[in-house]
Image (cartoon, rainbow, N blue to C red):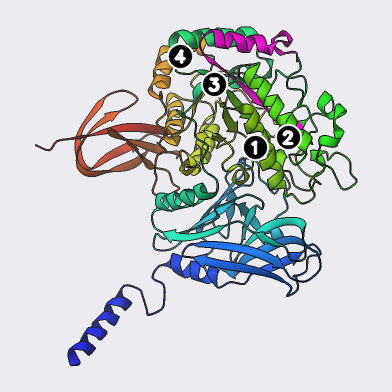
């Protein structure tokens, strides 16, 4: 009996020493999730008041997954503005680091709970004017928190079929809700809501593995192999690209680098947004002949399309005003009345994805482009507008998420076996609907762009190969380029940051971020003018690995890419002075090689130390395991 008491006392001592007390979770993340699970939920009606007891919300947990539904037993229709899934005092210090996804791909949120920072270029709340609950800073789809003791929490909805999830926060509180857009829940009706996940742990990448596996159950990834490679006309020639520009580069690629098989014609070939099959000024009004020439060279035509928008001058808008999302007066909704109106040939109107005739139009359009024009790659831009807020749809029971998803399914039906890239798209609403996802703002030949857009891409690199192929935008390796182009907010882009352009180290830094993304590779240079040295860099990026570098944290200093026969370490210095970097090697001896130069660095165990990595620079270091002597 005495021995048993001693054993119990010893067990309690060990438990307390490990930071546990009976009935209390061990880690800060587990404590956080316990508080979340115990927090109240609330259904808010269209009038802004809580629903009465006849409307009930059910939350059922199975470990880290929560399934939810709302039922109306009140005997009367109830318009629902939003459902607050969880609302609680998070109890974390204000300096707790965060990362949240944007509604559309130009928005990302970092910083801390107290001082959130806009990492993306154009925010949901300011640029697109998407209302935020209670004016709290809001992420969409997912939110991560970096807690104490190297612990992390990841909160996300693992589906996005009907409602977008919103993660609103400040220094004291987290409020997680679904935007229900004042839809009516009929008497006796039940809505199955989006599935929710709450997980914690110290391994950043392991948490993302769990999230993407859960998402795949609801939105299986659309696969398209191998990782696409190609060339894009936009950054070298802009909207005034000529048939000769394309022909010269097509001929060069066919003769020197046929791996870049997709030749993408960007914005500028159409007369107006919406009139995609009509003859514009570019190419003498004959884009189809340019596409045919690409095919004749053994390469594949790729084309830019903004399917959800139309210019007021377009024949599409003039002939079919009933196809468009309406305002409260029943007129086609001008997008600049409730947000950003478009960057060119606007203000844009929005095709309604719930309208059967719009769906038929989408399918026919992309079927013709695939079969008649021979396009095997579609870059879909301005997809955000397909999920625009504040409008009235043909199907009054559909949310803006459903409108977008229905439109996208019609596009996929027409596109057939072609590769479909989403750009300027609603990120979570695009799950399972695109083969590739642009993961950053437009690139340009500036150090600031290489740094900022590189970070945007690496923040989303966990999505690559798990949800889709990431598109880190074009690789740029030469100075110059088009000076008459604008970014996705309609702002002019300056040609260079300095007369000489970026430094050699800055170009290598940019190339390293593209490689580390593991995603697509499209050249944005006039390849007829590329120097042998810069061409050698481009060749070293071929083919893309399909494997994103894995990082311990969002400092993105040293990332590891695991390939079948080697490791590659992506090592970055984002700062303004030289810095030391340490590469931790797995067990055994490794032969290290500088990928850029081919120089052998020697054999190393345990770690390799870079004593002084220059500012604005990056290295790719290949590691091959060798037998110990």
Query: As drawn, is 162 to the left or to the right of 34?
Result: right
Q: Which residue is mark 3?
A: 524
Q: Quadrant of the N terminus?
A: bottom left
Q: Earlier in the sequence, mark 1 or mark 3?
A: 1
Nearer to us of marks 4 and 2 is: 2
Q: Which residues are magenta?
A: 281-309
**Closer to viewer: mark 3 or mark 2:** 2
> Residue 581 location in percent, x, y?
33, 42
The CA distance from mark 4 to mark 3 is 15 Å
Rendered view: 115 above or below 412? below
Circle 2: is it few (<14), some (14-19), or many (20+) Cα within 10 Å?
A: many
Which quarter of the figure is the C terminus placed in?
A: top left
* Separation (CA) of disc 3 from disc 2: 33 Å
Within 10 angstroms of label 3, few (less than 14), some, or many (20 or more) residues? many
Marks 3/2 in contact by CB < 8 Å: the verdict is no
Between disc 1 and disc 3, the foreground one is: 1
Q: Indicate the position of residue 61 as horizontal and vertical percent values.
A: 52, 66
Element at label 3: loop
Q: Is residue 486 above or below residue 283?
A: below
Circles 4 and 2: CB distance less than 8 Å? no
Residue contact at pointers 1 and 4, CB within 8 angstroms: no
Give the mark nearest the N terminus, 4 or 2: 4
Q: Which mark is residue 359?
A: 2
Check disc 2 and report its element: helix, strand or loop: helix
- Secondary structure, mark 1, is helix
Q: Which residue is mark 4?
A: 258
């Amino acid at each position: 009996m005495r021995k048993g008491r001693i054993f119990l006392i010893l067990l309690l001592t060990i438990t307390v020493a490990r930071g546990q007390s009976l009935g209390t979770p061990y880690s800060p993340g587990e404590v956080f999730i316990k508080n979340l699970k115990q927090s109240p939920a609330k259904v808010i009606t269209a009038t802004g008041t809580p629903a009465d007891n006849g409307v009930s919300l059910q939350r059922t947990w199975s470990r880290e997954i929560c399934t939810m539904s709302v039922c109306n037993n009140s005997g009367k229709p109830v318009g629902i503005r939003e459902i607050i899934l969880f609302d609680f005092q998070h109890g974390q210090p204000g300096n707790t680091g965060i990362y949240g996804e944007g509604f559309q791909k130009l928005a990302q949120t970092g910083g801390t709970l107290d001082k959130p920072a806009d990492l993306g270029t154009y925010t949901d709340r300011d640029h697109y004017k998407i209302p935020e609950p209670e004016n709290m800073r809001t992420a969409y789809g997912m939110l991560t928190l970096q807690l104490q003791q190297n612990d992390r929490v990841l909160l996300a909805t693992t589906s996005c079929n009907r409602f977008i999830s919103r993660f609103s926060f400040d220094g004291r509180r987290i409020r997680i809700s679904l935007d229900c857009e004042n839809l009516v829940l009929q008497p006796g009706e039940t809505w199955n809501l989006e599935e929710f996940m709450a997980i914690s742990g110290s391994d950043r990448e392991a948490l993302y593995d769990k999230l993407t596996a859960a998402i795949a159950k609801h939105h299986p990834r659309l696969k398209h192999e191998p990782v696409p490679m190609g060339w894009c006309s936009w950054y070298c020639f802009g909207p005034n690209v000529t048939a000769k520009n394309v022909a010269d580069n097509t001929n060069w690629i066919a003769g020197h680098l046929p791996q870049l098989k997709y030749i993408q014609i960007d914005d500028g070939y159409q007369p107006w947004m919406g009139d995609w099959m009509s003859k514009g000024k570019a190419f003498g009004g004959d884009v189809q002949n340019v596409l045919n020439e690409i095919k004749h060279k053994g390469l594949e035509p790729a084309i830019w399309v903004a399917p959800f928008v139309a210019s007021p001058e377009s024949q599409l808008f003039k002939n079919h005003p009933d196809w468009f999302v309406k305002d409260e007066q029943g007129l086609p909704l001008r997008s600049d009345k409730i947000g950003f109106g478009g960057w060119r040939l606007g203000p844009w109107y929005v095709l309604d994805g719930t309208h059967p005739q719009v769906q038929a139009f989408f399918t026919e359009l992309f079927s013709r482009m695939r079969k008649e024009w021979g396009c095997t790659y579609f870059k879909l831009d301005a997809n955000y507008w397909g999920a625009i807020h504040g409008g009235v749809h043909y199907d009054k029971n559909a949310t803006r998420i459903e409108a977008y998803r229905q439109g996208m399914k019609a596009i996929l039906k027409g596109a057939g076996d072609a590769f479909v890239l989403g750009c300027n798209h609603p990120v979570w609403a695009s799950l399972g609907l695109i083969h590739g996802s642009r993961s950053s703002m437009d690139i340009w030949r500036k150090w600031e762009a290489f740094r900022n857009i590189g970070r945007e891409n690496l923040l989303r690199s966990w999505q690559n190969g798990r949800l889709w192929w990431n598109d880190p935008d074009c690789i740029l390796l030469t100075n110059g380029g088009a000076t008459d182009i604008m970014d996705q907010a309609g702002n002019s882009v300056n040609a260079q940051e300095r007369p000489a352009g970026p430094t050699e180290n800055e170009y290598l830094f940019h190339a390293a971020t593209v490689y580390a993304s593991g995603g697509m590779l499209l050249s944005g240079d006039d390849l007829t003018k590329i120097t042998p040295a810069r061409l050698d860099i481009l060749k070293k990026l071929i083919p893309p690995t399909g494997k994103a570098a894995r990082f311990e944290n969002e400092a993105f200093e040293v990332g590891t890419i695991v390939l079948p026969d080697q490791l590659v370490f992506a090592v970055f210095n984002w700062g303004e002075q030289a810095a030391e970097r340490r590469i931790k090697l797995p067990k055994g001896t490794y032969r290290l090689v500088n990928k850029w130069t081919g120089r052998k660095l020697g054999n190393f165990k345990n770690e390799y130390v870079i004593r002084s990595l220059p500012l604005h620079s990056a290295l790719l270091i290949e590691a091959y395991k060798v037998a110990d002597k």
